[in-house]
Image (cartoon, grey):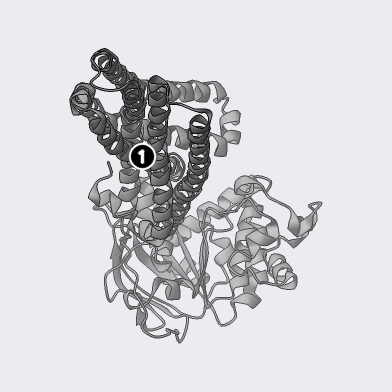
């Protein structure tokens, strides 16, 4: 069964649909009670036949009652299926929605620990297991309980001693079920974990298909996927051993009870202790009791699977973002796009080395370039500015306000960010550009596309802006993806624009031209352009040089060339490399 801790995850849904559930279980009880009346009618007819008092009228009357009961059973069965199975689907939908909403609140450290495949398994396989447990599992459990109690009561009414004999094998079934189900939780957990690993491997292979083909790794990928599939089957077979034992053993116990009833009940009938009608009714009730015994293993399996899966889902809900949000008591408006860092230091979780070390810098209106070698902290600086990681109080100010006193949405709504890796969705080009401003007009979209030097290339497609770009923008080149991402950021028209090497896939001349084209959009804005190439930043108002997480120099292009050897060395290396390539 579900633990109380895990069940708390379902409590809001259970409360919301409580009346639907009550009606559903009322219909289920109706089915059980109506079924229990059928053997009584059969007993009446059989006893009348035995005594020779039966008549056509009596038999037709019994048949008519049975027919009415059958109609009532059919109606009630439809109702409980619609209401309770429908509830399980609503629960699955609501839980999936809550899971996605919660995932969107979590930060980068969580997604560095959990793979996409694992999360996909939670929202598919695990949720399906919970749905089955709260649907058919719950129905079967309640049905089995009601039928067991009611059938035993009717059997005891006919003959208490025969009832005791009939249920004598059942403690053995309870003991065996408890022992077998003890290992089911652990084995099903391994099944679900391996399913997550399989999903992640398949996702990774499909998303990297071009690289795998380029390196002729198709055969090795198939072999590895096959190996992982064998492990998945192995875990499933170990689970199937328990499942395969529970149902047959339940059936065996049920048949043993039937054998005892036939032997001892037959003797009681011969002795005249009970009538033939009583014996037929008793056997009918025993058959009703056999279903709960046979269902016990199946229900146990469903609940164990559902409980395991719900526990895995609950572990995600227990995750909390390290970056705590602030609830605004009143509307917050920032006076400017001014950014100030005062002694900012930062280390990634689990690392002791500082990615940023005592940064003190102001970013005001105008273009500020940031350059440095790989690993110097440029991208980390972008992650901090866009509030992807927490910072100490009093080190990061936005518009003269400590960012830790501002809601995350307020900070991010003042930023337009173009990351190194442009994220493109499997949508139209228009939808990708308008991601942050879905109500943008076509004229606005075309204007920013022209500024990002991508409009002509878009129009070269047969469907223009309505072209669907495929999974992760597979139809586009790296440079096209980056420029679409830049157009997306420009469309937002926010006071702060951060471009983190977002034009690395285009050549130096194109990058320089794009930066000149977007000048009109940057008027009155704070623009931070991070680039591994110095030449396109030559006209920036100020350039920061980073090395090992520190700002080692700052100034304009000519001043840095004259005063800083590190900057001069980078510039000389890049210009000489460009000359050789030319």
Residue 512 place in picture, x, y as percent:
63, 63
Secondary element under disc 1, as helix, strand or loop, is helix
- Residue found 56% across the figure and 25% down from its top: 218
Residue 55 place in picture, x, y as percent:
49, 28
Q: Does residue 136 appear left or right of residue 9 in this picture?
A: right
Residue 457 place in picture, x, y as percent:
75, 56
- Residue found 56% across the figure and 68% down from its top: 538
Residue 246 appears in the figure: yes
Q: Quadrant of residue 36?
A: top left
- Residue found 45% across the figure and 26% down from its top: 54
- Residue found 61% across the figure and 56% down from its top: 482
Q: Quadrant of residue 185?
A: top left
Q: Does residue 412 appear left or right of residue 235 in this picture?
A: right
Residue 566 appears in the figure: no
The quadrant in which the N terminus is found is top left
Q: Does residue 80 appear left or right of residue 309 in this picture?
A: right
Residue 6 place in picture, x, y as percent:
28, 49
Location of residue 102 with respect to 27 vertically, above or below: below
Location of residue 242 with respect to 520 vertically, above or below: above
> In front here: 427 or 19?
19
> In front here: 363 or 246?
246
**Residue that mark 1 sits on:** 143
């Amino acid at each position: 069964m579900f633990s109380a801790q895990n069940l708390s995850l379902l409590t809001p849904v259970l409360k919301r649909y409580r009346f639907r559930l009550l009606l559903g279980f009322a219909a289920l009880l109706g089915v059980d009670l109506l079924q229990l009346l059928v053997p009584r009618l059969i007993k009446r007819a059989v006893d009348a036949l035995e005594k020779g008092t039966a008549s056509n009228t009596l038999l037709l009357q019994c048949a008519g009652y049975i027919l009415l009961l059958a109609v009532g059973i059919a109606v009630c069965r439809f109702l409980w299926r619609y209401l309770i199975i429908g509830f399980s689907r609503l629960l699955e939908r609501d839980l999936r929605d809550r899971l996605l909403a919660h995932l969107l609140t979590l930060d980068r450290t969580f997604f560095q620990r959990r793979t996409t495949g694992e999360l996909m398994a939670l929202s598919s396989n695990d949720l399906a297991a919970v749905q089955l447990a709260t649907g058919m599992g719950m129905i079967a459990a309640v049905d089995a309980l009601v039928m067991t109690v009611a059938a035993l009561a009717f059997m005891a009414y006919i003959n208490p001693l025969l009832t005791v004999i009939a249920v004598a094998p059942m403690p053995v079934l309870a003991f065996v079920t408890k022992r077998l189900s003890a290992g089911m939780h652990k084995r099903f957990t391994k099944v679900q974990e391996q399913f997550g690993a399989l999903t992640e491997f398949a996702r990774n292979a499909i998303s990297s298909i071009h690289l795998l083909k380029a390196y002729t790794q198709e055969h090795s990928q198939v072999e590895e996927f096959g190996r992982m599939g064998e492990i998945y089957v192995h875990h499933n077979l170990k689970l199937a051993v328990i499942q395969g034992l529970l149902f047959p053993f339940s059936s065996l116990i049920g048949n043993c009870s039937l054998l005892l009833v036939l032997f001892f009940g037959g003797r009681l009938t011969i002795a005249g202790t009970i009538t033939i009608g009583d014996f037929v009714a008793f056997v009918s009730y025993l058959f009703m009791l056999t279903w709960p015994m046979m269902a016990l293993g199946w229900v146990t399996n469903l609940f164990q699977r559902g409980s395991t899966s719900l526990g895995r889902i609950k572990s995600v809900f227990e995750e909390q973002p390290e970056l705590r949000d602030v609830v605004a008591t009143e509307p917050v408006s920032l006076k400017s796009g001014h950014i100030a860092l005062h002694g900012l230091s930062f280390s990634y979780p689990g690392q002791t080395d500082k990615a940023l070390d005592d940064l003190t810098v102001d970013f005001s209106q105008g273009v500020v370039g940031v350059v440095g070698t790989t690993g110097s902290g440029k991208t980390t600086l972008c992650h901090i500015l866009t509030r992807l990681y927490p910072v100490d109080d009093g080190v990061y100010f936005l518009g003269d306000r400590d960012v830790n006193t501002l809601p995350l949405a307020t900070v991010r709504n003042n930023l337009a960010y173009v990351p190194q890796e442009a994220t493109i969705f499997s949508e139209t080009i228009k939808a990708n550009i308008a991601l942050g401003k879905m109500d943008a007009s076509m004229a606005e979209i075309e204007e920013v596309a022209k500024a990002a030097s991508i409009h002509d290339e878009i129009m070269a497609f047969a469907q223009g802006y309505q072209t669907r770009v495929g999974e992760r923008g597979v139809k586009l080149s790296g440079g096209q993806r980056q420029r679409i991402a830049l157009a997306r950021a420009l469309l937002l028209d926010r006071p702060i624009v951060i471009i983190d090497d977002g034009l690395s896939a285009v050549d130096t001349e194109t990058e320089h031209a794009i930066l000149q084209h977007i000048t009109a959009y940057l008027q009155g804005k704070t623009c931070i352009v991070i680039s591994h190439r110095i030449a396109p930043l030559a006209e920036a108002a100020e350039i920061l040089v980073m090395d090992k997480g520190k700002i080692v120099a700052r100034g304009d292009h000519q001043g840095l060339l004259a005063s800083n050897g590190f900057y001069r060395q980078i510039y000389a290396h890049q210009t000489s490399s460009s000359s050789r390539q030319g």
